[in-house]
Image: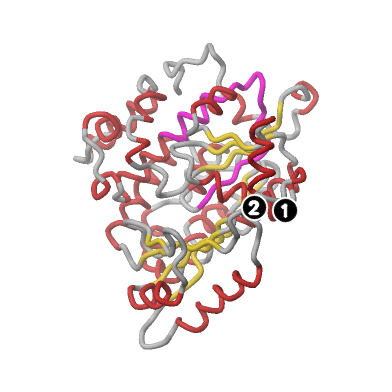
Amino acid sequence: MSQATTATNNDKSSDSAREQLLIVCPGRGTYNQAEWGTLTRNAANATWLSRFDARRRDAGLPTLSELDADIPFRANLHGRGEHASPLIYACALADLQAIDSERYEIAAITGNSMGWYIALAAGGALGHDDAFELIAAMGKLMQDTLAGGQVLYPWVDEQWRPQWAQRREMLTLIERIHGEDGAELYLSIDLGGMLVFGGNETGLARLMAALPPRERFPMRLHQHAAFHTPMQRAVRDVARQRLPLAPFATPKVPLIDGRGHIWTPWSTDPEALWDYTLGEQLVAPFDFTTALRVAVREFAPDRIVILGPGTSLGGATAQVLIQQGWRGLDSKATFQARQEADPLLLSMGIEEQRCMLVPSKYSTKVGL
């Protein structure tokens, strides 16, 4: 793993010149047609990718390299949990390893939804191969069960400024719809200026009918189950039986979970980390907004880096920063102006921004 991923806040004496980064790991839905080929481009010669491919080949599955380069992108194939989840993890891992450890130090790591599993690997709480097994297993479990679905809807205005009354009205819909004639509806993810709802078909249909049309919203998310809701109890119970405690370890870098709790290198109980990851995290709302708010307040990063693939998490991250007034940000316009002058938020799915983080001497041949 890159040296940057093993640095801690205790090593400031020799690292004071390095910029402090907050790493944000992506979740499901970030590998799409536009991202096809990303893994081959960034990690074709990585030895860890060869190991991942061998494991999938032994399991009778198409390898990640084949999915990314040889098999033309098809949403109903590449979007399946057993393929999408490890593809996203591998792309994020390639980006993480490419960060220039001589210029940057990773101060903390968080992620959105499935990004929590990636954060465990990025922070050293799971080894690369152990994280691959966890992510592959959870992706398949979710796909096999596919209990319920998700709907996404924004509550900020066109300038990404919060509209708190609208947010309250949206949350009230959950109370109104849930439990009526078999409808199930829950808050799934608090995602910046958007809410992700999870529920069964009856609950989601009633929600979509109640929400006023707004451009492409309400948006039903393709091949997504009702993640982070009580509808995942069966997945939780199976996961806890199949996935042992042993691989979990104390992280080397602070991790911020979906409640805003910080898991530090000096205080983490690996058993408690396992219990949260395969317990509450699966059946309770994932609060990405709170996780990011805690991260910027507690670790004061110089920049925030979103690992690839894709760039879809950039808007939600910026919306949280605007809600917090971080570095004077108060609207989409001020955020865009700051990005033009000296970007605070770097998405590695955007090539120009990735180049700011990667040393010119870097080669994907240097993979662990």
Question: Where is residue 256 shown, x and y percent of the image?
Answer: 63, 49
Residue 29 pos. (x, y %): 40, 49
Judge whether 350 appears above or below 153 on screen. Answer: above
Which residue is pictured at 40% across the width and 66% down the height? 232
Identify which residue, 78 or 90, lies in the foreground: 78
For label 2, count other residues whose C-alpha is less than 10 Å away and answer few (under 14), some (14-19) or many (20+).
Answer: many
Label number found at residue 293: none
The C terminus lies in quadrant: top left
> Within the image, what quadrant is residue 15 found in?
top right
Q: CA distance from mark 2 to mark 1?
A: 6 Å
Residue 37: give x, y in percent of width and height: 33, 30
Q: Residue at x 65, y 55 (%)?
A: 261
In the image, taking residue 292 as reference, residue 232 lies left or right, namely left
Residue 96 in the magenta stretch? The answer is yes
Determine which residue is flagged by label 2: 320
Magenta-span inclusion, residue 359:
no
**Relative side of 15 to 308, left or right:** right
Instruction: Kindly identify the amino acid type of the residue bearing the numbered disc 2.
Output: Val
User: Label 1 sits on what residue type?
Assistant: Gln
Quarter residue 249 falls in: top right
Residue at the image point whose x is 40% and y is 35% from the top:
90
Residue 160, quarter of picture: bottom right
Task: Say if residue 237 shows up in the picture.
Answer: no
Does any portion of residue 146 appear in the rendered image? yes
Q: Are marks 2 and 1 in contact (CB under 8 Å)?
A: yes
Q: Where does the magenta region start and end?
A: 91-112
Question: Percent position (x, y) of residue 87?
Answer: 36, 39
Q: Which residue is mark 1?
A: 324
Task: Indicate whether 261 appears above or below 92.
Answer: below
Q: Give the residue drawn at x 49%, y 27%.
A: 351
Residue at the farthest top position: 361
